[in-house]
Amino acid sequence: MSIKELIKKFKDKTQRVIETLENAKNLYGEYLKGEEKKGRLDEVMTKWVTEQVEGDKKIKMITKWIIKRYIIVQIPYITQMIFDLIKTRVEGITE
């Protein structure tokens, strides 16, 4: 998988997980709170990226190292930006 494909899949997966967590209830039947959702989202996406990178033999060792060293630690920031983009309405682009 190329880096472009990984980024696209990451964005799509993040969006699906956000939608799922918005409707998720905890063990007590209550909806998850914002920080609980965010923590779960970051956990799921970190695991997903790690599995994608480790499982893809086409990704070169140096690229895997860079992703593990510099990208995975930024997942909380990246997922927050994706969430912010989802909730932002840009006049003329979205309705």
Image (spheres, rainbow, N blue to C red):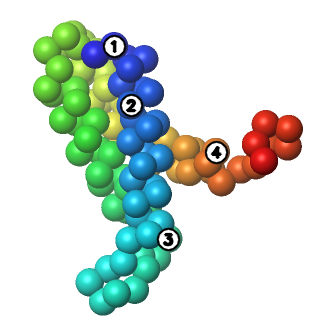
Residues at badges 4 and 3 in contact (C-beta under 8 Å)? no
Amino acid type, callout 1 = Ser
Q: Is residue 17 above or below residue 21?
A: above
The image shows residue 74 at horizontal and vertical percentages of 42, 40
| Few, some or many residues within 10 Å of mark 2 (<14, 14–19, 20+) | some
Residues at badges 1 and 4 in contact (C-beta under 8 Å)? no
The image shows residue 5 at horizontal and vertical percentages of 38, 20
Amino acid type, callout 2 = Lys
The image shows residue 18 at horizontal and vertical percentages of 45, 56
Q: Secondary structure at mark 4?
A: helix
Q: Is residue 55 left or right of residue 6?
A: left
Mark 1 to mark 4: distance in Å? 24 Å
Q: Nearer the viewer, mark 4 or mark 2?
A: 2
The residue wearing badge 4 is 85
The image shows residue 41 at horizontal and vertical percentages of 38, 56
Q: Is residue 50 above or below residue 4?
A: below
Mark 4 to mark 3: distance in Å? 16 Å
Q: Is residue 34 above or below residue 55?
A: below
Amino acid type, callout 3 = Gly
Query: Which of the marked residues, 4 or 2, is nearer the chain's N terminus?
Result: 2
Mark 2 to mark 3: distance in Å? 24 Å
The residue wearing badge 1 is 2
